[in-house]
Image (cartoon, grey):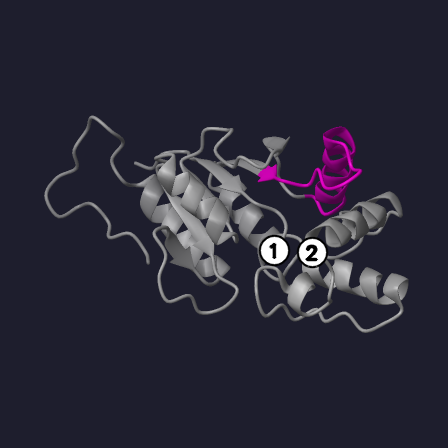
Amino acid sequence: MTRKLDIGLDIDGVLYPFVDVISRYATDVLERPCSAEPESWDWYVHQWGLTAEEFFALCGRAVHDGVLFTQGDPLPGALEAADALARAGHRLHYVTARAVAGVPASLAWHRTAQWLGKWDFPVDSLTIAADKGCRPTDVFLDDSPGNCDALVDAGHARPVLWCHAPIADHRAERVFDWPEFLALVEAESIACPPGRTLPEGSRPTPAH
């Protein structure tokens, strides 16, 4: 017998092509090439020559111009994976820190909800927050090592790091593609909830 889980999903870099969209916008606005191939988490500093303040101001401008959070197709496999999770009966909770400079949470929520609706993502809840533990979830998928560290520190049941490139080690579990994440969720759904035990040898081995 399987459990129906509350699945937390980050959006940017997991479902939405944030880097591709903002790099095209930056190339147009700054009138110089802005690479869409990040070499580090703060690529805009080392590759684009922007300060964090300048980058987030650029992001805010892109949101108001109807580009960022509005344009862009879902990342490969993202919509199909979300549909598969919903068909299995799991509840999908999107938590994203999109209230960037000059963009109130209400506008970030509205633009995000429109994009999810445009592509027919199954949605049980949508929250704009930097704290990915603000909504209780059984599994949370995020591409930020820092966010996953915070979830581990907060005692989250199962934070999972979406890896864009090989990462030698991390305290959270790691996945590199959607089939791997779907297998992890399936294993969690048939794992025994707290306070109960499964027969010897029947508990699945978590994916790593």
Compared across the picture, whether 132 is left or right of 47 comes to left
Residue name at image x 54 percent, y 43 percent: 9
Q: How many marks?
A: 2
Picture disc at residue 43: none
In this rendering, the answer to whether 109 lies above or below 170 is above
| Quadrant location of the C terminus in the rendered image | bottom left
Compared across the picture, whether 85 is left or right of 108 comes to left
| Residue at disc 2, secondary structure | helix
Residue 74: quadrant of the picture: bottom right
In this rendering, the answer to whether 153 lies above or below 29 is above
Q: Residue 57: x, y in percent?
A: 79, 48
- Residue 41 magenta-drawn? no
The CA span between labels 1 and 2 is 6 Å
Q: Mark 1 points at which residue?
A: 13
What residue range appears in magenta? 95-120
Is residue 17 something one can see in this rendering? no
- Residue 110 magenta-drawn? yes
Q: Name the residue under label 2.
A: 18
| Residue at disc 1, secondary structure | loop
Q: What crowding class fits label 1: few (fewer than 14 Cα within 10 Å), some (14-19), or many (20 or more)?
A: some
Query: What is the three-letter code of the residue carrying label 1?
Result: Gly
